[in-house]
Image (cartoon, grey):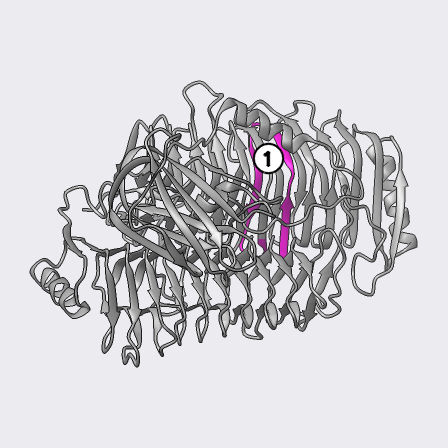
Amino acid sequence: MSHPSIIQPSRPRSVGSVGSVVFLLAAFMVPAVAGHAQQATGPRHPGLYVPPASSYITDPAETPITLAFGSAKVSDIQRQLNAARAVDANSPIVLTLTGRYRIEDAPLTLPSKTSLVLYGTIEAAPNARASSLIAIHGQSKVAVAGGILEGNDQNVAGIDVEGSTKINIDAVTIRHTGRDGIVLSGSGNTVFDSGSVITRCDISHAGGNGISVRSITQALLLDNFIHGNKGTGVQLSSAHTSLTNNDIRHNNIGVFDDANNNLISDNEIDDNEQAGVQLASTSSGTAVMRNIVSHNEANGIDFDGSDNLVFDNTLDNQVNLTDRSAANYVVAHGTPLNAPVSQYFYPPTIDNQHSDPVLNGVSRVDVTVGSEDITAVQATYDATRTANPNSFIVLHMNGDFALDGTAPLTLGSNTAVLLNGTIHVTGKVSRVITDTNPASFVSISGGTIDMNGKGKITGIYFPSTTMAYIDHVAVINGGVPTKRTSGGMIQLQRGSGYNILYRNTVNESGGRCLWTQYANAHYVVMENLLSNCNMDAVDFDSSTSNSYAIGNTSLDNYRYGVFIEQSDSYNKIYGNYTTTRDIPNPPGHGIGVYNNATGSGTRNVTNGNTAFSNTNDVVDNGLRIGSISTATGGVAETAHTFFFNNVATNDRGEGILFDTQFPGSVANYLSQTVLAGNGTDLKSQYSNGATPPDFFNPQSAINLALNRPVVASSVASDSAAGNAVDGLAFTGWEAGGGQPSASLTVDLGSSVGFQRVVLKQLDAHSISLVRLQASQDGISFTDIPRSVSRIGAIGVLSFNPVTARYLRVTIWHIFQGPIGLREFAVFPQ
């Protein structure tokens, strides 16, 4: 039986406080400024990945096998590694390498349940005959962390993963490989591999692709820097993969996708020789959202395939979009796009009340109404539609409006509502705004729907819409949070295409805040502020599939922050924050993946969902995977859930609650969960043939400088000293101009031992002279012997162990150019 490790954050991290909740509320409630459109911000800093400190790898009863080598031949290391695995087939192995190792005829080959912690360098020998530096073939639960893989332009890949599952690759620098930097492959695009991850890697100057991901499902690529590769930065020939928060630049193509149901989000994709993002004709169901795509030479996004989405990207290329398929969707946000082939939608919003065409080839008619009864608004709207049957209607509602009858405001296809005011519910009504069934291309933006405390009312209900867009709407006062009612404040069902809920505010309901149902449409639920609902902030219900909940904030909701339930499949959930800290005896769950048989039959499996980088603080349960039957003879199962690097802290009950039932509840996998301050970190109770959860928490390379306080002698504008110690290779510190030298001093927090420093220069072509100095008090510094060195793009400085609290690096440029560091890493070995 496996259990998760109790993983503590590597340093204290604020994941929620009363002050932060107030700040979040204030930030969301600031009125939008007309004419100003939000732009994508690309990768966030710090990154999505929280490096955990694992207490064990797969099971608390394990005794890891430890192997450590300084100077040694790879053949000797391989022989001892193979011998250790032959003697003990099940225990995890932690292999630590601190020297410099040369690959000649064969790669270093890693068996299952092995964590390689690399502080040194593995390099290709001249005329190396190996196909890669590291090989992982047909294995499971293998990790590579830290260090440098130097290809020396030989015909090798950096890391070659074939037919394997549950692979974690973190913070590895891979350079100058003749083949791909990393190849990650599994058992096929329809086989659920329960998660492999590449995080915080720096991959450059590969003769092939930076990263190739193929024949695998549920892979995650987070916080990587992929640059200067001759092939594609990232090739996605995989399914249900998330490429998120990466910097991808100076490759041939930035990202190439020729498979299905992938997510490309929050990346910066710049200066590539051809397209920034290219979706091939075989791609389908891929969403390209919130990326910065700029200065790519051929085009920003080359868009083919079917059922793909482009939304909320910042594009600055000579050709922003090359549009090739009528089966795709483009939702322009902020500025119009030239998308003559796709199903194009550019709804005016409260912060961008443009006058451009909303749909291709459809004329636009604007009509404005002032404060009046909704019945009168309906009459004006209907008359406008009758007079202009082939036009897109933009209805401007300015002022206060009363809904005192029984009929909601009902919209037809090709309609946008700009609500610059408030709708007050004063009569008995079940819905405030709805649309016809079916409808297409309907949007609502801005304003407030005030239910005046009336329960059992839905603010916005769309029964079957193709391309619904609900933006910056506040729906409030829909009941008493402590008294459960049915329904949701905003509810979407069926339809097709992509239905988008973006930056809305919901407060006070006896039901759900946001509620989606059925697998017909993809739902994009992003950056909403959702509070004081009796049920869920976001409820993905009734087979919701291939949808996204991203960056939502859930405050004091009584059931779930994000609830993935009832036969939901293939959804991707990340960057959401949940707390119930202001409720006595905090109830509820953070992220739940659950299935309940409410009838006597067998419900379809809740299957293949992925949740990563979510934060849950002060709730009852942080993370839940479960299934149950509430009807005699019913069967409900939850399978192939992948929870990666979620934070569950200060929870009254369990950090992780696992309670599945029935034989189809299999292959639920959790990796690198951050748990701290919970009543119980894990409660595992599987029954009726369900299998236990599976865990893998590989060892990491310990960077003593990571996110520590740092002071620079000078800082250029638009730079920050902390960027050198944030673990992200695509950020950096640049010193102020005009100085012959500059220094950076890091506070390691206490007097600790270290003997290796890695410096990555901001300018990869610079040659510099550096000096290291140590101090106990931060005032008096002493030179570290053998640490004055000339370095190029990457400098690895090794010396006899030093014990100190403060470490300073001083840099002198030998040639003209900016002084700065992308990374300043300090290692104990």
User: Does residue 355 appear in this view?
Assistant: yes
> x, y percentage for residue 25?
61, 28
> x, y percentage for residue 726?
45, 44
Whether residue 82 sits left or right of residue 316 in the image: it is left
> x, y percentage for residue 454?
66, 24
What residue do we see at 76% from left, 43% from top?
36
Magenta-colored stretch includes residue 355: no
Looking at the picture, does residue 363 appear above or below residue 16? below
Q: Please, what secondary structure does the residue beneath circle 1 have?
A: strand
Magenta part, dominant SS:
strand
Q: Mark 1 sits on what residue? A: 529
Q: Which residues are magenta?
A: 497-522
- The kind of residue on which mark 1 rests is Leu
> x, y percentage for residue 630?
37, 39
Q: Residues within 10 Å of mark 1 (few under 14, many from 20)?
A: many
Which residue is the extreme one toward the right?
387
Whether residue 530 sits left or right of residue 577 in the image: it is right
Which residue is the extreme one toward the left?
87
Residue 277: image quadrant is: bottom right
Between 223 and 448, the one nearer to me in the picture: 223
Between 606 and 652, the one nearer to me in the picture: 652
